[in-house]
Image: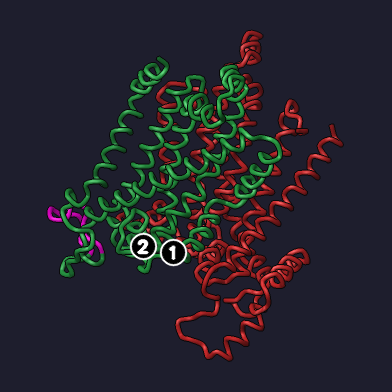
Amino acid sequence: MRSLSLTFIIRKFVEALVTLFVIATLTFVALRALPGGPFDSEKALPPEIKANIETRYGLNDPMHVQYVRYISGLVRGDWGESYKYVGRSVSDIIAETLPVSMQLGFLSLLMALAVGVPLGVLAASRHNSWVDTTAMLVAISGVALPSFIVGPVLVMIFSFGIPFSFLHGFLPPALWESWEYMILPVVTLGIRPAAILARMTRGAVLEAIRQDYVRTARAKGVAERNVLFSHVLRNSLIPVLTITGPLVAGLLSGSFIIEVIFAVPGIGKHLVASVTNRDYPLVLGLTLLYSAMLVVANLVVDIMYSVVDPRIRVEK
Amino acid sequence: MLESRALRRFLKNRAAVVSLGFIVFVALLGLLAPWIAPYSFDVQDIDRTLEPPSVDHWFGTDSLGRDLLSRVIYGARMSMAVGIFTAFISVLIGGLYGALSGWVGGWIDTLMMRLIDTLDAIPSLVLLILVGMVFTAYQPFESPELRALTGILFALSVVGWVSMARLVRGQVLQCRELLFVEGAVAMGASPIRIMGLHIAPNILGPIVVMLTFQIPSNILFESFLSFVGLGLQPPYSSWGVLANDGWRAKSSPHLIIFPGAALFFTMLAFNLFGDGLRDALDPKS
């Protein structure tokens, strides 16, 4: 079992690397296919200067030379230099802003788990009662609420005091300096995953409650509390786990809009800006980074499966 | 008939029926926007900017004095059109791709699925932005607004088909093992005939359900992109564009509340409708 898991992990890891390599290639091709270079500004540069700049970044070399240079740079951990932020490497920009985004995403995931899972369990344990109906109405509303509506509304309420003037300045809207600054962005980002988790958990618990082993436990006279926590909940965690991979992805890419709204100094704001600036190295770097995080999240979920549920053998 | 039983189950779900009604209502609003909207979406009244809701302007006016109600109605037109159109395109692409992959099998299937795995490994918003950017650049149209519109249509269609392809492939794989399909093969029916006549009717349910979830997700993506300025450009009005206007105006909450509410209730209706449809077609879940 142990060696089996190890080969599984290694195989998955290699697959992930191949996937990322293909993504790097596809992105490279897509970006170079775009008309208009990164240094086409509205004010036309004198041709000599433009030529100088393009030589500096190697943009005049044949495409395959640029490609080989880029890929070999990737392998060596050199992700290139930003076109827009002169003199700064992509890795620097990532190193500086990623921790903030990770913190935002992690806190939101925690919030989603802390709110979503109990809500789902509560709804399922009172199946078809008003508690269930209310909880699910709240959950489906949470799924339907776009973060770019919630965010601005929260900002209006808490930082401008519209229309509740007593809340004016209660929670600062921007930056990322202490915990007060984190509440609004984290809540805004966490609502949707919390709602999705609540719905998933409810479904999974209802499924588990119908199983024979639960009936057996009840027949043996196990207290209802224990049935719920040690028999039902443990077994319903697996489907909930499956959704966490995609959820992490949603948190990653969803965070950029939150970062724009709340002026969080994370990596997300660079995503939009780098695309409009045609900052190719940064776009490539960010695409790879986001994809790598998604791939890793899914890998972790795959591995956790086999840990949580011994029935699932990881060989395929 | 199975269909009538599913229909009866669906009709019993009040939330789903009401939601369907609401979706039809919004779609009609969008379709008939030029006749229903009290004003045109781009007529400005400079003397009456940023007014809160009043008798003349039920939803108030925006920073250029345009009637917000009319803009929300025209926004419905754009958002619904974009959502429905791109969802159907992705069904078309994903359906063909998935059917081919599932039917042919072997190394072609493996290769085709690898491509899907790769696309899946890029977070959809990042993929959307990249694809949208490339498609916006390559276009026959001159006007930047039109370019942005076709760019986003393309991007949403290209990104959405992946999950559909996966679904269809899985369904085809299940179906081709069934006896009646084997029988058809034995009788020498062509693959296209088998697909269209024997398999397609049997896998339609899950596809329709997925479609009802794909439409709102595309509407949401479009709004998302328009909100950050990578999607539709003003003066086109979609709910995302309006939400962005509202966000920038800051001091006038009605500018974000009304488009936000339109978006929220539409999302809610699609979700409830999709749930109801799924439960009706698949009583097991």
Left or right: A291 as drawn, with respect to B203 = right
How crowded pointer 1 is (Cα within 10 Å; few <14, some 14-19, many 20+) is rated as: few
| Extent of the magenta region | B50-62
The numbered dot on residue B48 is: none
* Amino acid type, label 1: Gln
Nearest the eye: B193 or A44: B193
Residue A183 lies left or right of residue B67; in this view the side is right
- Identify the image quadrant of residue B226: bottom left
Q: Residue at x 53, y 27 (%)?
A: B194
Q: Which residue is mark 1?
A: B139
Residue A225 visible here: no
Residue kind at label 2, given as amino acid type: Leu
Residue position marked by numbered label 2 in the rendering: B146
- The colour chain A appears in is red
How crowded is the residue under tag 2: few (<14 C-alpha within 10 Å), some, or many (20+)? some
Look at the numbered disc 2 and give the secondary structure of its residue.
helix
B261 is within the stretch colored magenta? no
Q: Is residue B52 magenta?
A: yes
The structure residue drawn at horizontal position 42% and vertical position 63%, both measured from the top left corner, is B229
In the image, farthest residue toward the top: A219
Question: Which secondary structure dominates the residues rendered in magenta?
Answer: loop
Distance from the alpha carbon under mark 2 to that under mark 1: 9 Å
B86 vs A45: above or below: above
Nearer-N-terminus badge (2/1): 1
Determine the image quadrant of residue B57.
bottom left
Q: Numbered disc 1: what chain?
A: B
Residue that protrudes farthest toward the left in the picture: B55
Q: In this structure image, what is the colour of chain B? A: green
Give residue B77's position: percent from left, percent from top: 29, 49
